[in-house]
């Protein structure tokens, strides 16, 4: 298996597929907040949670922390910032049905003990642009997005340690202009951790606020946490415990979010699989499985909804063959839903890619089963870092 970021070439043919192929995503109903570095991207307000971030994952209420609002959320991380080396990545996928995608990423050190991270991404319907500058404890970020609605924001934050504060200005809706502030404090004492945060924004001649807090206790392999949230006089509460044993992580939680119905969740997590359930409100159970063994790698996620007797299924599988110092891979990908009457609706794709680091070349036929939407995609990804070249012992002995 080729090492490096270009080895996930197949995700570029449909960038949201990697995000959707998880049990937590299928239970999330594509809702919740967009959290960046465990804080909401916008202090108060709604940002599309399905933006094509380069490392976005969906996490449950316990994993999301005090700003998660008691729901499943899409989370992403800014760093790590480079201190001495540069890294860049470029990709372009052309599509015969006007569904082209592209991305550009650059992480590099800058003069004055400053580091920068920049990226642009576009999938079928959404695009996001972001620039971040880090200097000591100060972080400046500017982000814009476009899709079902357009928005942007700029934020400056200061994080000297257990305390962080930020101020910003954003536009989340047409005609919306909102200055905002957010502050968070986290104190640790032995096995106990206490967090508290307060955020406010002035929008449409009205002041909106949000307050959050949480307590986390750890005893051996057990972790207990309880969180609360109040937003515009609407309280929310969620909490539960996790237990780590033998490579497995067991968790149970109850959530009464500020918005929506209360529910419970039970989960079993492992490095290669997850089994997650949602009880009470719209009960469902979901699971995902990741395999990378020999010539095969793939992942599958499925969710059964008991209320509507429906099944959601996202999966892909790739057979690979090593050739020289590269790898050729090909296989199918499927996203579909079955209703209570047994009728299927979805898309099936066939993809193929060749990776010879730092390049990947890929091609695919998308929506094979649809005579109207069937299309071809083809493209290339390229990754570069200024790490000095290294000669392996095998190559050295062969000279």
Image: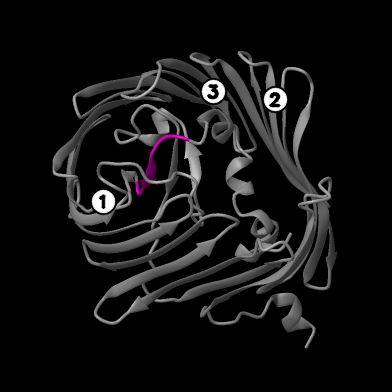
Find residue 377 and report its image quarter: bottom right
**How many residues crowd mark 3 within 10 Å: few (<14), some (14–19), many (20+)?**
many
The quadrant of the image that shows the C terminus is bottom right
Q: Secondary structure at mark 2?
A: strand
The quadrant of the image that shows the N terminus is bottom right
Q: For this view, does 8 lie left or right of residue 84?
A: right
Coordinates of residue 336 in the picture (x, y in percent): 72, 35
Magenta residues?
31-37
Coordinates of residue 387 in the picture (x, y in percent): 52, 78
Q: Comparing marks 3 and 1, which lies closer to the viewer? A: 1
Q: Earlier in the sequence, mark 2 or mark 3?
A: 3
Whether 27 is drawn above or below 341: the answer is below
Camera-nearest residue between 58 and 14: 14
- The alpha-carbon separation of the residues under discs 2 and 3 comes to 19 Å
- The alpha-carbon separation of the residues under discs 3 and 1 comes to 39 Å
**How many residues crowd mark 1 within 10 Å: few (<14), some (14–19), many (20+)?**
few
Find residue 205 and report its image quarter: top left
Q: Is residue 288 within the magenta segment?
A: no
Q: For this view, does 154 lie left or right of residue 334?
A: left
Q: Secondary structure at mark 1?
A: loop
Circle 2/circle 3 CB separation < 8 Å: no
Any part of residue 292 in sight: no
Q: Comparing marks 1 and 2, which lies closer to the viewer? A: 1
Q: Comparing marks 2 and 3, which lies closer to the viewer? A: 2
Q: Secondary structure at mark 3?
A: strand
Q: Residue at x 37, y 44 (%)?
A: 35
Q: Earlier in the sequence, mark 1 or mark 2?
A: 1
Find residue 313 and report its image quarter: top right
Any part of residue 43 in sight: yes
Residue tagged 3: 267
Residue tagged 1: 176
Whether 232 is drawn above or below 35: the answer is above
């Amino acid at each position: 298996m080729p090492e490096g970021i270009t080895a996930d070439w197949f995700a570029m043919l449909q960038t949201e597929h990697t995000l959707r192929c998880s049990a937590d995503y299928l239970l999330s109903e594509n809702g919740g907040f967009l959290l960046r570095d465990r804080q909401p991207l916008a202090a108060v307000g709604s940002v599309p949670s399905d933006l094509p971030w380069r490392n976005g994952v969906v996490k449950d209420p316990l994993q999301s922390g005090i700003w998660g609002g008691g729901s499943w959320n899409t989370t992403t991380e800014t760093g790590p910032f480079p201190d001495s080396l540069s890294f860049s990545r470029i990709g372009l996928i052309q599509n015969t049905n006007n569904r082209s995608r592209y991305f550009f990423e650059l992480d590099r050190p800058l003069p004055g003990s400053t580091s920068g991270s920049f990226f642009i991404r576009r999938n079928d319907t959404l695009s996001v642009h972001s620039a971040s500058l880090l200097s000591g404890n100060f972080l400046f970020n500017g982000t814009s997005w476009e899709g079902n609605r357009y928005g942007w924001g700029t934020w400056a934050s200061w994080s000297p340690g257990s305390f962080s504060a930020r101020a910003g200005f954003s536009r989340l809706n047409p005609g919306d202009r909102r200055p905002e502030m957010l502050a968070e404090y986290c104190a640790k004492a032995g096995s106990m951790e206490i967090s508290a945060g307060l955020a406010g924004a002035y929008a449409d001649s009205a002041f909106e606020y949000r307050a959050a807090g949480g307590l986390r206790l750890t005893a051996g392999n057990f972790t207990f946490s309880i969180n609360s949230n109040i937003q515009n006089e609407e309280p929310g509460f969620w909490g539960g415990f996790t237990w780590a044993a033998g490579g497995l992580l067991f968790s149970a939680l109850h959530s009464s979010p500020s918005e929506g119905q209360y529910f419970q969740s039970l989960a079993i997590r492992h490095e290669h699989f997850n089994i997650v359930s949602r009880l009470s409100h719209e009960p469902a159970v979901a699971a995902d499985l990741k395999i990378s063994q020999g010539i095969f790698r793939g992942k599958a996620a499925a969710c059964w909804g008991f209320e509507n007797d429906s099944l959601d299924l996202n999966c892909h599988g790739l057979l690979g063959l090593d050739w020289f110092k590269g790898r050729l891979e090909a296989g199918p990908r499927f996203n579909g839903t079955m209703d209570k009457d047994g009728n299927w609706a979805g898309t099936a794709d066939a993809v193929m890619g060749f990776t010879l680091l730092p390049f990947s070349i890929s091609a695919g036929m998308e929506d094979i089963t649809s005579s109207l939407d069937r299309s071809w995609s083809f493209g290339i990804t390229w990754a570069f870092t200024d790490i000095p070249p290294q000669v392996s012992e095998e190559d050295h002995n062969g000279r």
